[in-house]
Structure formats: C-alpha cells, structure tokens
Amino acid sequence: MKEFMEYDFAVETIVLCLFLPKGKGDAVHKDRPSHGLALHIGAERLYKFDDGRALTVRDGDLIYLPKGSNYSVTTATLGECYAINFDISGDATFEPFTIHTKNVRDMLSSFEAAERSFKNKKQGYKMRCKEKLYRILAQLQKEYATEYASSQKSDLIAPAVTYIHEHYTEGELSVAELARKCNITPEYFRRIFGKIYGSSPIKYINDLKISHAKELLLSGEYSVSDAATLSGFSDISYFSREFKKATGVPPRQFN
C-alpha cells in the first residue's frame, strides 16, 4: 500500500466507470486488463487472489485491484459497488489492498460523478472521469499521509465507536454521551474522532443512517417515513434534507 500511496500517478486512459447494484459483481477475473479501484457501499465481499491472498471489503471500504491480477469475488452481504478501471503511464506495479476511507460521502460523490460522465458520453467525458479519479487518488493519499493518530487513541474511543455501530438506528446519539463511554471530555472526543475518521461524530453517524435508509428504500418495502424512522431519524424534514445532501435526490425519488 505504501508504494501506491506515495506514487505520482499519470493517468493515461479511463477504461471504464461503472456501478454494480446489489446482487451483481460475483465473478472470476483472469489477467485483469487494467488497474481498478472499487468502493463498496453496504456490501461485504471476499476477494481471493491466485497467490493465496484473501481480502475482505465491507461498507465504506475501497479495494485496489492490480493490472494483470487473477482473482475471484464472492458476496457475503449484498450491497452496491462503484468502480473505475484505468491505465497509467509506466510499468509500476502495486499489491492489492483495502482501505476504509475516512470521508465516505466525498469519495462516493467522486465515484458517482465519474460513473455518470462515463455513462452519458458527453463531450469531454473522459477528462471529467480523469478529474474525478485524480480527486479519489488525492483523497486516498492525503488520508494515508495524515494518518498519525496513535493506536492508543484509537483504543481510547473504541467503546464509543462500537456503541455507534450497534445503536445508530435507535435515535439521536449525543457527543457528550459517547465521550462519557470513553471517560474523556466531549471536546477531546471530537478531536480524536476527527483525526481518526476524518469526520465529526455526528456526520459519521448521519452517514451510517443515510446508508441504511438507502438500503431500505431500494428494497421497495418501506415508505420514506418508515425508512427515516428505522434509520434513526425522528424528524422527517431533517432526514429529507440530509438524504438529498448525500445523494443529490430527495428520498421519494431515490431508486
């Protein structure tokens, strides 16, 4: 991963930008023709490479797939996936890796914009796709370079992070409540959380709620009101604003 994160990329060609809905993506790949980055939303997938390496990706994880690699993909939990396949100048090689991006919303926005441009094929679309790919690469390299929070600090807020993932759909979680679980002040909790996750605690929680609401709406079995309530939003107006901010469309138009 270190070599990838420190490499000065010169993207030659955007080969493909695509969106894989739930239930798609399981396959066997032989001699992959290009480099690839794939962001997983709500999914858990296992990538097995022919050298015996196995990488698991989960919600909010990004995987790098090397040019020329052989691997298979199997799904444990259904979810979505955005991918960009590309070629670069030179013959640099990198090992496959996964990383949990700190700012899923910004990363997802770049992948979505690249997929839309590639699909629409309007004049200059490949340059717009390159722009989004460079933005993704820059975000990854910045997160990697600025990751300096110690494991001790990660362990310090671990009780709160675990609590968030277990209870985010049950209503509003306050920073003061989360800080108490770690026996630190709210100000210190916010500072550590932001350094590690690149987001405020409230934004991180809202991103989890929105991701869950998207899954419920895509199932076709829940109304907007039900999806909001089951995702932990008590105010339907606030839910609608946050949903549109995250996805670009109101929840009633999301499909």
Image (cartoon, rainbow, N blue to C red):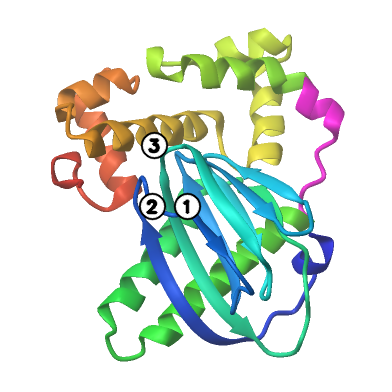
- Of the pair 185 and 222, the residue shown nearer to us: 222
The answer to whether the residues at label 1 and label 2 have Cβ atoms under 8 Å apart is yes
Which of the marked residues, 1 or 3, is nearer the chain's N terminus? 1
Q: CA distance from mark 1 to mark 3?
A: 22 Å
Q: Give the residue number, with chain letter if any, for mark 2.
A: 24
Three-letter code for the amino acid on which mark 3 is drawn: Ser
Q: Is residue 218 positioned above or below 31 on the image? A: above
Residue at point 36% right, 46% down? Answer: 23
Residue at point 35% right, 45% down? Answer: 22
| Residue 21 appears in the rendering | yes
In x, y percent, where is residue 183?
73, 9
Dot label at residue 211? 3
Secondary structure at numbered mark 3: helix
Residue 97 part of the magenta-drawn span:
no
Q: Is residue 1 left or right of residue 134?
A: right
How many residues crowd around disc 3 within 10 Å: few (fewer than 14), some, or many (20 or more)? many
Indicate the quadrant containing the N terminus: top left, top right, bottom left or bottom right: bottom right
- The range drawn in magenta is 146-155
Secondary structure at numbered mark 2: loop
Which of the marked residues, 3 or 2, is nearer the chain's N terminus? 2
